[in-house]
Amino acid sequence: MAISSTLKKLVFTFLLLQISSLSHAHLLKTCKIDQIYNIGDSISDTGNLIREIGLATFCARPPYGESFFKKPTGRCSNGLLMIDFMALDAGVPLLPPYKNSGADFRHGVNFAVAGSTALPCKKMENAVFMFGTIGGNDYNYAFFEGKPIEEVRSMVPQVVNTIMLGVKKVMSYGATKVVVPGNMPIGCLPVYKTQFLTNISAAYDESLCLKQMNDFAKYHNQQLQQAIHDLQQQNPNATVVYADYYNAYQFLLEHSKSHGFETERACCGIGGKYNYDMPRMCGNDGVGVCPDPERYVSWDGVHLTQRSYKIMAGWLLRQIFSSLHCHF
Protein backbone atom coordinates (compact mmCIF):
# COMPACT_ATOMS: atom_id res chain seq x y z
CA MET A 1 0.00 0.00 0.00
CA ALA A 2 2.84 2.39 0.90
CA ILE A 3 4.62 1.70 -2.41
CA SER A 4 1.41 2.28 -4.35
CA SER A 5 0.78 5.57 -2.54
CA THR A 6 4.35 6.74 -3.12
CA LEU A 7 4.18 5.83 -6.81
CA LYS A 8 0.92 7.75 -7.18
CA LYS A 9 2.51 10.84 -5.61
CA LEU A 10 5.54 10.57 -7.92
CA VAL A 11 3.33 10.29 -11.01
CA PHE A 12 1.23 13.24 -9.84
CA THR A 13 4.36 15.34 -9.17
CA PHE A 14 5.67 14.52 -12.67
CA LEU A 15 2.38 15.59 -14.25
CA LEU A 16 2.34 18.75 -12.19
CA LEU A 17 5.84 19.67 -13.33
CA GLN A 18 4.67 19.26 -16.92
CA ILE A 19 1.65 21.46 -16.27
CA SER A 20 3.82 24.08 -14.55
CA SER A 21 5.96 24.35 -17.70
CA LEU A 22 2.92 25.34 -19.78
CA SER A 23 4.43 28.67 -20.81
CA HIS A 24 7.36 26.79 -22.40
CA ALA A 25 5.36 23.94 -23.94
CA HIS A 26 3.58 25.76 -26.79
CA LEU A 27 1.76 22.65 -27.94
CA LEU A 28 -0.72 24.60 -30.07
CA LYS A 29 2.14 26.57 -31.63
CA THR A 30 3.86 23.26 -32.41
CA CYS A 31 0.58 22.26 -34.04
CA LYS A 32 0.85 25.44 -36.17
CA ILE A 33 -2.37 26.87 -34.76
CA ASP A 34 -2.34 30.61 -35.48
CA GLN A 35 -6.04 31.39 -35.09
CA ILE A 36 -8.42 30.63 -32.23
CA TYR A 37 -12.16 31.23 -32.31
CA ASN A 38 -14.24 30.81 -29.18
CA ILE A 39 -17.92 30.52 -28.33
CA GLY A 40 -18.96 29.96 -24.74
CA ASP A 41 -20.23 31.50 -21.53
CA SER A 42 -18.69 33.37 -18.60
CA ILE A 43 -15.95 30.74 -18.20
CA SER A 44 -14.38 32.06 -21.42
CA ASP A 45 -15.80 35.57 -21.92
CA THR A 46 -12.91 38.02 -22.35
CA GLY A 47 -15.04 41.15 -22.46
CA ASN A 48 -18.24 40.87 -24.49
CA LEU A 49 -20.78 41.13 -21.69
CA ILE A 50 -19.03 44.12 -20.12
CA ARG A 51 -19.37 45.92 -23.46
CA GLU A 52 -23.00 44.89 -23.68
CA ILE A 53 -24.32 45.85 -20.23
CA GLY A 54 -21.38 47.56 -18.50
CA LEU A 55 -21.41 47.66 -14.71
CA ALA A 56 -24.62 45.65 -14.62
CA THR A 57 -22.38 42.57 -14.76
CA PHE A 58 -20.53 41.97 -11.50
CA CYS A 59 -17.45 40.84 -13.48
CA ALA A 60 -17.08 44.49 -14.54
CA ARG A 61 -16.33 45.59 -10.98
CA PRO A 62 -13.27 45.31 -8.72
CA PRO A 63 -11.74 43.02 -7.53
CA TYR A 64 -12.22 41.13 -10.82
CA GLY A 65 -9.04 41.17 -12.90
CA GLU A 66 -6.90 42.44 -10.04
CA SER A 67 -4.16 39.78 -10.17
CA PHE A 68 -3.17 40.24 -13.82
CA PHE A 69 -4.83 43.23 -15.46
CA LYS A 70 -5.03 45.38 -12.29
CA LYS A 71 -8.57 46.26 -13.32
CA PRO A 72 -11.77 44.52 -14.44
CA THR A 73 -11.85 43.50 -18.11
CA GLY A 74 -15.09 41.53 -18.04
CA ARG A 75 -13.30 38.27 -17.30
CA CYS A 76 -15.01 36.44 -14.43
CA SER A 77 -11.84 35.69 -12.50
CA ASN A 78 -9.03 37.50 -10.73
CA GLY A 79 -6.99 37.31 -13.93
CA LEU A 80 -6.52 35.13 -16.99
CA LEU A 81 -8.96 32.44 -18.15
CA MET A 82 -8.31 29.05 -19.76
CA ILE A 83 -8.91 30.51 -23.22
CA ASP A 84 -6.20 33.11 -22.47
CA PHE A 85 -3.68 30.43 -21.53
CA MET A 86 -4.51 28.56 -24.72
CA ALA A 87 -3.86 31.69 -26.76
CA LEU A 88 -0.52 32.14 -24.99
CA ASP A 89 0.34 28.52 -25.74
CA ALA A 90 -0.43 29.08 -29.42
CA GLY A 91 1.70 32.22 -29.41
CA VAL A 92 -1.15 34.45 -30.53
CA PRO A 93 -2.53 37.59 -28.82
CA LEU A 94 -5.20 37.18 -26.14
CA LEU A 95 -8.50 36.77 -27.97
CA PRO A 96 -10.28 40.10 -28.39
CA PRO A 97 -14.03 40.14 -27.70
CA TYR A 98 -15.94 40.52 -30.94
CA LYS A 99 -17.79 43.52 -29.52
CA ASN A 100 -14.47 45.39 -29.47
CA SER A 101 -14.91 46.71 -33.01
CA GLY A 102 -11.46 48.29 -33.10
CA ALA A 103 -9.58 45.10 -32.23
CA ASP A 104 -7.29 43.06 -34.48
CA PHE A 105 -9.13 39.83 -35.35
CA ARG A 106 -6.45 38.32 -37.58
CA HIS A 107 -5.55 35.66 -35.00
CA GLY A 108 -9.09 34.89 -33.91
CA VAL A 109 -11.95 36.33 -31.94
CA ASN A 110 -13.97 35.56 -28.84
CA PHE A 111 -17.72 35.29 -29.34
CA ALA A 112 -18.32 34.06 -25.77
CA VAL A 113 -21.62 35.13 -24.13
CA ALA A 114 -23.23 36.59 -27.25
CA GLY A 115 -22.75 33.31 -29.11
CA SER A 116 -22.44 34.65 -32.65
CA THR A 117 -21.09 32.26 -35.29
CA ALA A 118 -20.44 34.87 -37.99
CA LEU A 119 -17.16 33.47 -39.32
CA PRO A 120 -15.52 34.22 -42.67
CA CYS A 121 -16.45 31.52 -45.27
CA LYS A 122 -13.02 30.10 -45.94
CA LYS A 123 -10.93 27.07 -45.05
CA MET A 124 -9.17 27.54 -41.75
CA GLU A 125 -6.42 24.94 -41.82
CA ASN A 126 -4.45 26.54 -38.99
CA ALA A 127 -7.39 27.54 -36.81
CA VAL A 128 -8.92 25.82 -33.82
CA PHE A 129 -12.48 26.54 -32.79
CA MET A 130 -13.36 26.26 -29.08
CA PHE A 131 -17.06 25.54 -28.88
CA GLY A 132 -18.12 25.77 -25.25
CA THR A 133 -18.83 25.47 -22.50
CA ILE A 134 -22.46 25.77 -23.60
CA GLY A 135 -25.53 24.49 -21.80
CA GLY A 136 -24.21 24.93 -18.29
CA ASN A 137 -26.35 27.97 -17.65
CA ASP A 138 -29.46 26.13 -18.84
CA TYR A 139 -28.84 23.56 -16.13
CA ASN A 140 -27.93 26.20 -13.55
CA TYR A 141 -31.17 28.09 -14.02
CA ALA A 142 -33.18 24.88 -13.83
CA PHE A 143 -31.48 23.62 -10.67
CA PHE A 144 -31.67 26.96 -8.87
CA GLU A 145 -35.34 27.30 -9.74
CA GLY A 146 -35.86 24.08 -7.80
CA LYS A 147 -36.55 21.71 -10.67
CA PRO A 148 -36.02 18.02 -9.72
CA ILE A 149 -32.90 16.40 -11.11
CA GLU A 150 -34.95 13.99 -13.24
CA GLU A 151 -36.50 16.95 -15.04
CA VAL A 152 -33.12 18.57 -15.60
CA ARG A 153 -31.71 15.27 -16.91
CA SER A 154 -34.48 15.26 -19.49
CA MET A 155 -33.01 18.52 -20.86
CA VAL A 156 -29.65 16.93 -21.65
CA PRO A 157 -30.47 15.49 -25.11
CA GLN A 158 -31.80 18.85 -26.27
CA VAL A 159 -28.78 20.74 -24.89
CA VAL A 160 -26.36 18.29 -26.50
CA ASN A 161 -28.24 18.46 -29.80
CA THR A 162 -28.04 22.27 -29.73
CA ILE A 163 -24.29 22.12 -29.12
CA MET A 164 -23.80 19.73 -32.03
CA LEU A 165 -25.91 21.89 -34.34
CA GLY A 166 -23.57 24.76 -33.50
CA VAL A 167 -20.51 22.61 -34.18
CA LYS A 168 -21.94 21.58 -37.56
CA LYS A 169 -22.58 25.25 -38.33
CA VAL A 170 -18.98 26.32 -37.71
CA MET A 171 -17.77 23.31 -39.71
CA SER A 172 -19.91 24.55 -42.60
CA TYR A 173 -17.94 27.81 -42.42
CA GLY A 174 -14.70 25.89 -42.91
CA ALA A 175 -13.64 24.96 -39.39
CA THR A 176 -11.61 21.72 -39.54
CA LYS A 177 -10.46 21.55 -35.90
CA VAL A 178 -13.21 21.95 -33.31
CA VAL A 179 -12.79 21.43 -29.56
CA VAL A 180 -15.98 20.81 -27.57
CA PRO A 181 -15.62 20.99 -23.76
CA GLY A 182 -17.65 18.93 -21.35
CA ASN A 183 -19.00 20.12 -18.01
CA MET A 184 -16.96 20.50 -14.86
CA PRO A 185 -17.93 18.54 -11.73
CA ILE A 186 -20.50 21.13 -10.69
CA GLY A 187 -21.02 19.41 -7.35
CA CYS A 188 -17.60 20.76 -6.30
CA LEU A 189 -18.48 24.44 -6.87
CA PRO A 190 -19.35 26.60 -3.83
CA VAL A 191 -22.48 27.88 -5.58
CA TYR A 192 -23.90 24.35 -5.77
CA LYS A 193 -22.59 23.23 -2.39
CA THR A 194 -24.26 26.26 -0.79
CA GLN A 195 -27.55 25.79 -2.64
CA PHE A 196 -27.78 22.08 -1.83
CA LEU A 197 -26.05 22.03 1.55
CA THR A 198 -27.00 18.96 3.58
CA ASN A 199 -25.97 17.17 6.77
CA ILE A 200 -26.22 13.77 5.05
CA SER A 201 -22.60 12.65 4.77
CA ALA A 202 -23.43 10.07 2.08
CA ALA A 203 -24.38 12.96 -0.24
CA TYR A 204 -20.69 13.87 -0.59
CA ASP A 205 -17.78 12.05 -2.21
CA GLU A 206 -14.17 11.79 -0.98
CA SER A 207 -13.47 15.29 -2.34
CA LEU A 208 -16.46 16.65 -0.37
CA CYS A 209 -18.34 17.31 -3.60
CA LEU A 210 -22.05 16.59 -4.10
CA LYS A 211 -22.31 13.15 -5.68
CA GLN A 212 -25.69 13.69 -7.32
CA MET A 213 -24.61 16.88 -9.06
CA ASN A 214 -21.37 15.33 -10.25
CA ASP A 215 -23.26 12.30 -11.54
CA PHE A 216 -25.43 14.69 -13.52
CA ALA A 217 -22.33 16.35 -15.02
CA LYS A 218 -20.99 12.90 -15.95
CA TYR A 219 -24.29 12.05 -17.64
CA HIS A 220 -24.15 15.22 -19.74
CA ASN A 221 -20.54 14.49 -20.64
CA GLN A 222 -21.29 10.92 -21.67
CA GLN A 223 -24.08 12.07 -23.97
CA LEU A 224 -21.86 14.78 -25.42
CA GLN A 225 -18.97 12.39 -26.07
CA GLN A 226 -21.26 9.99 -27.91
CA ALA A 227 -22.59 12.84 -30.07
CA ILE A 228 -19.03 13.97 -30.84
CA HIS A 229 -18.06 10.41 -31.78
CA ASP A 230 -21.04 10.13 -34.12
CA LEU A 231 -20.27 13.48 -35.76
CA GLN A 232 -16.62 12.53 -36.22
CA GLN A 233 -17.65 9.30 -37.93
CA GLN A 234 -19.80 11.31 -40.33
CA ASN A 235 -17.02 13.84 -41.02
CA PRO A 236 -13.70 11.95 -41.23
CA ASN A 237 -11.90 14.90 -42.84
CA ALA A 238 -12.53 17.16 -39.86
CA THR A 239 -11.27 16.81 -36.29
CA VAL A 240 -13.80 17.16 -33.48
CA VAL A 241 -12.21 16.77 -30.04
CA TYR A 242 -13.83 16.38 -26.64
CA ALA A 243 -12.15 18.53 -23.96
CA ASP A 244 -12.39 16.75 -20.61
CA TYR A 245 -13.09 19.64 -18.23
CA TYR A 246 -14.37 17.17 -15.64
CA ASN A 247 -11.08 15.33 -15.16
CA ALA A 248 -9.04 18.50 -15.60
CA TYR A 249 -10.90 19.90 -12.59
CA GLN A 250 -10.35 16.67 -10.64
CA PHE A 251 -6.61 17.00 -11.34
CA LEU A 252 -6.79 20.58 -10.08
CA LEU A 253 -8.51 19.45 -6.86
CA GLU A 254 -5.89 16.77 -6.22
CA HIS A 255 -3.08 19.26 -6.75
CA SER A 256 -4.71 21.84 -4.49
CA LYS A 257 -5.39 19.43 -1.64
CA SER A 258 -1.87 17.99 -1.74
CA HIS A 259 -0.42 21.49 -1.50
CA GLY A 260 -2.71 22.69 1.28
CA PHE A 261 -4.66 25.11 -0.90
CA GLU A 262 -8.28 26.02 -0.22
CA THR A 263 -10.55 23.78 -2.27
CA GLU A 264 -13.98 24.55 -0.80
CA ARG A 265 -14.38 28.23 0.06
CA ALA A 266 -14.51 31.05 -2.46
CA CYS A 267 -11.73 33.63 -2.34
CA CYS A 268 -14.04 36.55 -3.06
CA GLY A 269 -17.33 36.22 -1.21
CA ILE A 270 -19.16 36.50 2.06
CA GLY A 271 -21.02 34.28 4.49
CA GLY A 272 -21.78 30.62 4.99
CA LYS A 273 -19.64 27.50 5.00
CA TYR A 274 -18.30 28.14 1.52
CA ASN A 275 -17.92 31.94 1.67
CA TYR A 276 -20.64 32.32 -0.93
CA ASP A 277 -23.97 34.13 -0.89
CA MET A 278 -25.79 34.52 -4.21
CA PRO A 279 -27.46 37.88 -3.37
CA ARG A 280 -24.09 39.24 -2.20
CA MET A 281 -21.62 37.98 -4.78
CA CYS A 282 -18.08 39.16 -5.39
CA GLY A 283 -18.03 42.71 -6.76
CA ASN A 284 -20.81 43.97 -4.49
CA ASP A 285 -20.17 46.51 -1.74
CA GLY A 286 -18.97 44.98 1.49
CA VAL A 287 -17.92 41.66 -0.05
CA GLY A 288 -14.35 40.85 0.87
CA VAL A 289 -11.56 39.16 -1.04
CA CYS A 290 -8.85 36.83 0.26
CA PRO A 291 -5.27 38.17 0.45
CA ASP A 292 -3.82 35.39 -1.74
CA PRO A 293 -6.11 34.20 -4.57
CA GLU A 294 -3.35 31.91 -5.86
CA ARG A 295 -4.01 29.60 -2.91
CA TYR A 296 -7.70 29.16 -3.79
CA VAL A 297 -9.47 27.01 -6.36
CA SER A 298 -12.64 29.10 -6.50
CA TRP A 299 -12.54 32.82 -7.16
CA ASP A 300 -16.17 33.86 -6.59
CA GLY A 301 -18.02 30.63 -5.89
CA VAL A 302 -18.98 30.17 -9.54
CA HIS A 303 -15.76 30.82 -11.46
CA LEU A 304 -12.17 29.81 -10.74
CA THR A 305 -8.98 31.70 -9.97
CA GLN A 306 -6.34 32.45 -12.56
CA ARG A 307 -4.07 29.81 -11.03
CA SER A 308 -6.82 27.20 -11.27
CA TYR A 309 -7.49 28.02 -14.91
CA LYS A 310 -3.77 27.77 -15.69
CA ILE A 311 -3.50 24.29 -14.19
CA MET A 312 -6.65 23.13 -15.98
CA ALA A 313 -5.50 24.66 -19.28
CA GLY A 314 -2.17 22.84 -19.03
CA TRP A 315 -3.88 19.51 -18.40
CA LEU A 316 -6.36 20.10 -21.21
CA LEU A 317 -3.77 21.16 -23.76
CA ARG A 318 -2.00 17.85 -23.33
CA GLN A 319 -5.27 15.96 -23.56
CA ILE A 320 -6.39 17.86 -26.66
CA PHE A 321 -3.02 17.94 -28.45
CA SER A 322 -2.85 14.20 -29.07
CA SER A 323 -6.23 14.32 -30.83
CA LEU A 324 -5.68 17.31 -33.12
CA HIS A 325 -3.83 15.29 -35.79
CA CYS A 326 -1.20 17.94 -36.33
CA HIS A 327 0.98 17.81 -39.43
CA PHE A 328 4.54 19.00 -38.90
Image (cartoon, rainbow, N blue to C red):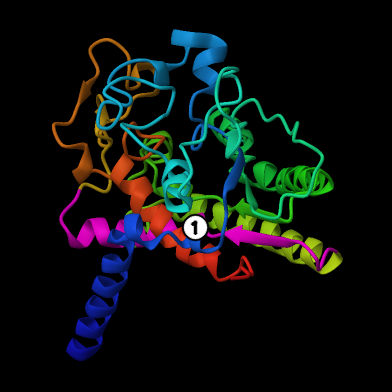
Q: Which residue is mark 1?
A: 29
User: As rendered, which of 157 and 205 lies closer to the eye?
Assistant: 157
Q: Nearer the viewer, residue 288 or 37?
A: 37
How many discs appear? 1
115 relative position to 194: left or right: right
Asked if residue 288 can be seen in this view, the reply is: yes
Which quarter of the figure is the C terminus placed in? bottom right
Q: Residue at x 84, y 46 (%)?
A: 172
Q: Left or right: where does residue 193 sit relative to residue 48?
A: left
* Quadrant in which residue 198 is drawn: top left
Task: Residue 51 in the image: state x and y as whole percent.
Answer: 53, 14
Q: Give the residue displayed 29% in from the left and 46% down from the top.
A: 307
**In the displayed structure, would residue 301 be above or below residue 279?**
below
The residue lying at 39 percent from left, 58 percent from top is: 314
Seen in the picture, residue 153 relative to 236 is either above or below; the reply is above
Residue at (83% x, 63% y) in the render: 235
**Magenta span of residues:** 235-261
Label 1 residue SS: helix
The front one of 259 and 222 is 259
Give the amino acid at mark 1: Lys
Circle 1: is it few (<14), some (14-19), or many (20+) Cα within 10 Å? some
